[in-house]
Image (tube, rainbow, N blue to C red):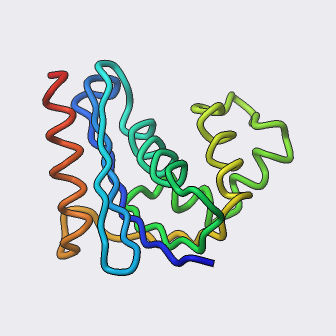
Amino acid sequence: MKEVTIYTDGACSGNPGPGGWAAILQYKGMEKELSGGERNTTNNRMELTAVIRALAVLKEPCAVDVYTDSQYISRAIGEGWLVKWKKNGFTKKGGLKNAEMWRELDSLLQKHTVTFHWVKGHAENDLNNRCDRLAVREREKYA
């Protein structure tokens, strides 16, 4: 199984507002950057989009380490929220925001062996900071 490292980030000005997302994929010394944005979105949607788009470009099942500064994503996976949401049909009391995106992410997680790592945003992680710059650049296209 191929081993891939992915760094992701999302950015939003206002919540909702213009947003951007970015991912950097690494495989055997090669890198690929992905990024995009939307005119009216939320930070959480941009964070999820970055992870989904990055996993979706993988052409075969891979062992993936995903590095994100999103506690929304890292906690949903690490603390078992996603498992509970799936068991409940992607619903929760009071409503599950971004349910369609969580369904899509869950589907991709079934294809790949993924380990999530939380990193502190805007700190000393060069790849996370690079993702942030890419996401902000995309967000600014819609500002």
Left or right: 64, with 79 as reference point: left
Which residue is pictured at 31% across the width and 59% down the height? 32
Residue 59 locus on image (x, y percent): 57, 56
Task: Report the front residue among 40 and 114.
Answer: 114
Which residue is pictured at 31% across the width and 79% down the height? 29
Residue 135 locus on image (x, y percent): 23, 44
Task: Report the front residue among 54 and 121.
Answer: 54
Which residue is pictured at 75% across the width and 45% down the height? 85
Task: Report the front residue among 116 and 13.
Answer: 116
Determine the image quadrant of residue 18: top left
All told, the count of numbered labels is 0
Which residue is pictured at 38% across the width and 80% down the height? 28
Residue 10 locus on image (x, y percent): 32, 45
For the N terminus, the quadrant is: bottom right
Left or right: 67, with 14 as reference point: right
Task: Report the front residue among 136 and 60.
Answer: 60
Q: Is residue 92 above or below residue 112?
A: above
Q: Is residue 29 above or below residue 54?
A: below
Left or right: 48, with 30 as reference point: right
Residue 112 locus on image (x, y percent): 66, 64
For the C terminus, the quadrant is: top left
